[in-house]
């Protein structure tokens, strides 16, 4: 699965081979990309492949001139 | 581009490299410190990058109270980062106080509860018959209600099975995800081994999975997730 984009939630949620250890790795990845504190910059770039909608609609995106770079 | 891992009160000891092998450093932002790495372009959301992020977060949390930052948004430069941290300084300080020196464990069912599959849609006459659309909507609504009831029951069952842990933890957050209901527990760092042992016993007895201890991602996010 390495190299799969974690931004695609389906890839994160996919069942993995070794039930216990890998299962909780999935729980950790869920937390890393979906929880944790969001420091709201007025200029932030999405990590490629992560939809910033996940980060909350309160994020104000402006002033970044990068085509497709900011969602 | 600056990638942010964690926010701390004291200057953290940095012990490892970060996403894509980048050097990890601390940026002083008012009374707080931001743990960051610098990247020539946008960071890509690969599994390896998310894991590297998590490893830096854990390494920092071992050395000083810290808030884990969500992987997903980077700052364009140090100035933008400082502004952002300054703007959120009050909230960040408050959350640091509440969760900074605590860890998170999670308990959920090993197999998402499939005991009560949603009832199949029953055909109630020809699709173009009068009232067919209304009947279809009624069935969909009944299905959704059944699924909600089933999710509530599963959450209640998980709550009962893990109730023994409640007096040992600081806070509990209940969520429902792709793998069914989960209970995230906020635990004092000093108690983590003890709580983990109890959690493992309950897991073995009731077919649950225990995750963590990790940095308190779920609680650092505040009440808005």
Image (cartoon, grey):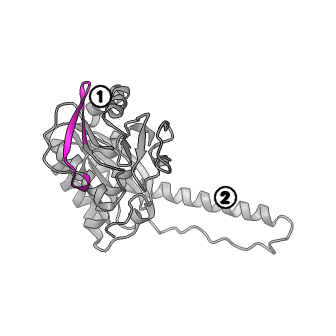
- Estimate how packed mark 2 is, as few (under 14), some (14 to 19) or many (20 or more) residues with alpha carbons within 10 Å: few
Q: Residue furthest right?
A: B130
The residue that mark 1 highlights is B93
Q: Which chain carries label 2?
A: B
Query: Where does the image place residue B48, in percent across and percent down from the top left?
Result: 28, 60
The residue at the point 38 percent across, 27 percent down is B87
Q: Give the range drawn in magenta.
A: B19-36
Q: Which of marks 1 and 2 is in front?
A: 1
Q: Quadrant of the N terminus of chain B?
A: top left
Rounded to the nearest angstrom, the CA distance separating label 1 from label 2 is: 44 Å
Give percent across and percent down for residue A24. Answer: 29, 61
Going from N to C along the chain, the mark reached first, 1 or 2, is: 1
Q: In which quarter of the image is the C terminus of chain B?
A: top left
Q: Examine the image and state in which quarter residue B85 appears.
A: top left
User: Residue at position x 26%, y 30% from top?
Assistant: B97
Residues B151 and B22: in front is B22
Residue B143 position, x and y percent, is 62, 62
Residue at the spot of label 2: B141
The residue lying toward the viewer, choosing from B23 and B128, is B23
Residue B206 to residue B84: above or below: below
Q: Nearer the viewer, residue B157 or B84?
A: B84
Name the residue at 50% across, 51% down. Answer: A68
Residue B7: % across, % down: 26, 36
Q: Indicate whether B28 appears above or below B134.
A: above
User: Are discs 1 and 2 both within one chain?
Assistant: yes
Check if residue B201 falls in the magenta segment. Answer: no
**What's the chain of the residue with tag 1?**
B
Q: Residue at image x 40%, y 68%? A: A14
**What crowding class fits label 1: few (fewer than 14 Cα within 10 Å), some (14-19), or many (20 or more)?**
some
Under circle 2, the secondary element is helix
Magenta stretch: dominant SS? strand
């Amino acid at each position: 699965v390495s190299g799969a984009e974690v931004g695609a939630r389906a890839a994160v949620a996919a069942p993995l081979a070794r039930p216990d250890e890998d299962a909780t790795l999935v729980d950790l990845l869920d937390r890393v990309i979906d929880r944790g504190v969001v420091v709201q910059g007025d200029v932030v770039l999405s990590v490629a492949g992560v939809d910033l909608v996940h980060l909350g609609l309160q994020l104000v995106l402006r002033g970044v001139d990068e085509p497709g770079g900011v969602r | 581009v600056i990638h942010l891992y964690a926010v701390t009160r004291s200057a953290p000891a940095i012990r490892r490299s970060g996403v894509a092998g980048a050097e990890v450093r601390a940026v002083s932002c008012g009374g707080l410190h931001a743990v960051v790495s610098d990247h020539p372009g946008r960071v890509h959301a690969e599994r390896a990058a998310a894991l590297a992020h998590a490893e830096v977060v854990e390494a920092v949390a071992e050395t000083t109270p810290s808030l884990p930052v969500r992987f997903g948004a980077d700052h364009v430069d140090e100035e933008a980062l400082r502004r952002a941290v300054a703007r959120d300084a009050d909230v960040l300080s408050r959350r640091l106080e509440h969760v900074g020196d605590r860890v998170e464990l999670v308990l959920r069912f090993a197999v998402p509860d499939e005991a009560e599959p949603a009832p199949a849609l029953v055909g109630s006459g020809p699709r173009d018959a009068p009232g067919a659309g209304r009947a279809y909507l009624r069935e969909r609504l009944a299905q959704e209600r059944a699924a909600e009831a089933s999710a509530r029951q599963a959450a209640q069952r998980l709550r009962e099975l893990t109730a023994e842990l409640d007096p040992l933890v600081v806070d509990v957050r209940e969520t429902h995800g792709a793998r069914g209901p989960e209970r995230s527990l906020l635990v004092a760092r000093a108690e983590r081994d003890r709580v983990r042992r109890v959690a493992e016993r309950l897991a073995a007895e009731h077919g649950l999975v225990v995750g963590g201890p990790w940095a308190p991602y779920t609680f650092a996010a505040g009440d808005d997730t």
